[in-house]
Every structure is written in C-alpha cells, then in structure tokens.
C-alpha cells in the first residue's frame, strides 16, 4: 500500500506529533508557548471588543459560543466561525478569541466554538482529514477509537469520522462557498500530505479550493499569527479565492485547485 502504512510505529507517532516538528522551540516548550499566546490573546480580545460570551448552543457543558462583534455592528456583516484544534483533547473557546481584533476592526464578526467532542469551516488549517493513521499512535489513547462500538471496528469508526471519506459532490449553491486549505512549512510530511490530498478530494468533488503552503511557520504559530492583521492567512479570511493569488507573495505558495 505504501505511505503511512509502511511506517514503523515510532515513525508514525512522530509524524502525528506536531510539537516535534517546530524549529523554534523544543516539543514541550512550543505547546506551552502556544497555550499561553492564544489564552493571552483571547483575554486581550475580550477586553477590547464588544462580545457575547458563553452563549449555549447545545446541552453539553462545553457547547457554548463566544461572539466577537464588529466595531460597527449595525446592518449585516460576515461571520468567521473558529473551531479550535487540539486533537479533540485540549484547548477550548477560552483560547480561541485571539484572532478577533484584526477581523472585528474590518467588520467581520468572530464566533469561537466550544465543544465537548469533535464537532465545518471554510478555512482549514493544518488538519487531520483521514483519522485511520492516528489509530496507531498515542493520539488514540484518549480518543479510544479502538474500543468496540456495538460491533463496529475501530477502522470503521475512524473512517466514518474522517472528512476525507465524507466529501460530497458540491451542489450548485456551493459555488459561493470557497474553501482555503492551509498547511505550515514545518508541519510533518504526513500533515502536509493530508492537507494536499484533502484539497484535491474537495476539488474532484466540484468544490472551489485553494491550497496555501505557508513558509516559515510551524503547526502552532500558523494559528497564533491570526492575531496579526497583515498575516497572509488573516488576509485570506477577508478576500474571495478569486483574489487570493495576490496573497502568495506575502508569505508562502498558493495553488488554486478549483
């Protein structure tokens, strides 16, 4: 079969451990620095923006939203929904508002989503879109996809929860939904492969997709820099894919795949 299936267990663990790939800091320090940066940025955003915090959208304890309104909230305005990462095990909406200041100042509302378990978005950043490889890593120790689910195998559990395997043909209305898939230069080869293959799968299904390969960042500061208005990925939240080609010159390379 090739690819991840041929990797020794230790190599596969390394591929799906983002903290091992940062050239800036050691594996423990980069995680703690990321948590500190996003938490502090969220506190600053809450202090400076008009907000509605802890808005319930479900019955779960963690199913709440933080809403950051534009500086001028009159009339209609676009909304960016931010769903945090953390391998469905850590982080929360309390570390998810850091990107709000440059967006609300440009008339965009930000909704930070909290959740109890894994929860859609049009800006996808350094994600895992095929869950089967992580069945064989430490990540599954907490996710426990290996547990018997009413006679369903762990592989079936991973497959039915993998975005890569749930791509549907784009309906005519989806023409207005433009998807940006971003990945960091210093993500692992497996994270980079997954981003490229998921972007291609969306394109094959008829979605309008751009893939942005960001230079000089790792799995953590690719997200942290969303607090900067001049950051290429922040700019990508403002403009449609038809204008995204100009973003490549700012930082990274962009392939338009649809």
Image (cartoon, helix red, strand yellow):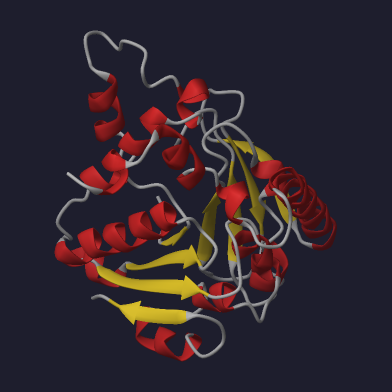
Q: Residue furthest front?
A: 8
Instruction: Report the residue at 66% width, 82% height from top.
Output: 230
Q: Position of residue 188 (x, y in %)?
A: 48, 55
Instruction: Report the residue at 26% width, 75% height from top.
Output: 257
Above or below 128: residue 10: above
- Any part of residue 253 in sight: yes
Q: Could you say which is closer to the camera, residue 93 or residue 204?
A: 204
Instruction: Report the residue at 70% width, 67% height from top.
Output: 227
Quadrant, the C terminus: bottom left
Q: Position of residue 161 (x, y in %)?
A: 31, 34
Q: Could you say which is closer to the camera, residue 62 or residue 256?
A: 256
Q: Could you say which is closer to the camera, residue 46 or residue 131?
A: 131
Q: Position of residue 233 (x, y in %)?
A: 55, 73
Quadrant, the N terminus: top left
Above or below 94: residue 122: below
Count of numbered labels shown in the rendering: 0
User: Would you say 5 lies left or right of 254 here?
Assistant: left
Above or below 145: residue 115: below
User: Would you say 155 lies left or right of 14 here?
Assistant: left
- Any part of residue 72 in sight: no
Residue 4 falls in which quadrant of the image? Answer: top left
């Amino acid at each position: 079969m090739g690819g991840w299936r041929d990797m020794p267990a230790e190599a596969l663990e390394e591929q799906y451990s983002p903290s091992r790939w940062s050239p800036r800091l050691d594996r423990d320090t980069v995680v703690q620095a990321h948590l500190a940066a996003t938490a502090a940025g969220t506190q600053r955003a809450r202090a400076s923006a008009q907000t509605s915090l802890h808005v319930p959208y479900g019955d779960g304890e963690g199913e709440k939203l933080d809403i950051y309104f534009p500086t001028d909230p009159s009339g209609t305005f676009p909304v960016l929904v931010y769903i945090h990462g953390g391998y469905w095990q850590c982080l929360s909406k309390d570390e998810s508002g850091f990107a709000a200041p440059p967006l609300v100042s440009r008339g965009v509302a930000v909704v930070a989503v909290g959740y109890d378990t894994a929860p859609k978005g049009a800006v996808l950043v350094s994600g895992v879109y095929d869950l089967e490889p992580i069945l064989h890593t430490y990540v599954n120790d907490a996710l426990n996809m290996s547990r018997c689910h009413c006679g369903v195998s762990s592989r079936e559990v991973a497959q039915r929860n993998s975005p890569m395997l749930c791509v549907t043909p784009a309906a005519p209305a989806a023409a207005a939904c433009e998807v940006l898939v971003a990945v960091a230069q210093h993500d692992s080869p497996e994270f980079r492969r997954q981003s490229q293959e998921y972007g291609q799968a969306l394109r094959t299904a008829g979605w309008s997709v751009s893939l942005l390969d960001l230079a000089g960042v790792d799995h953590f500061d690719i997200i942290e820099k969303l607090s900067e208005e001049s950051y290429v990925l922040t700019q990508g939240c403002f403009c449609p894919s038809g204008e995204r080609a100009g973003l490549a010159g700012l930082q990274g390379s962009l392939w338009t795949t649809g």
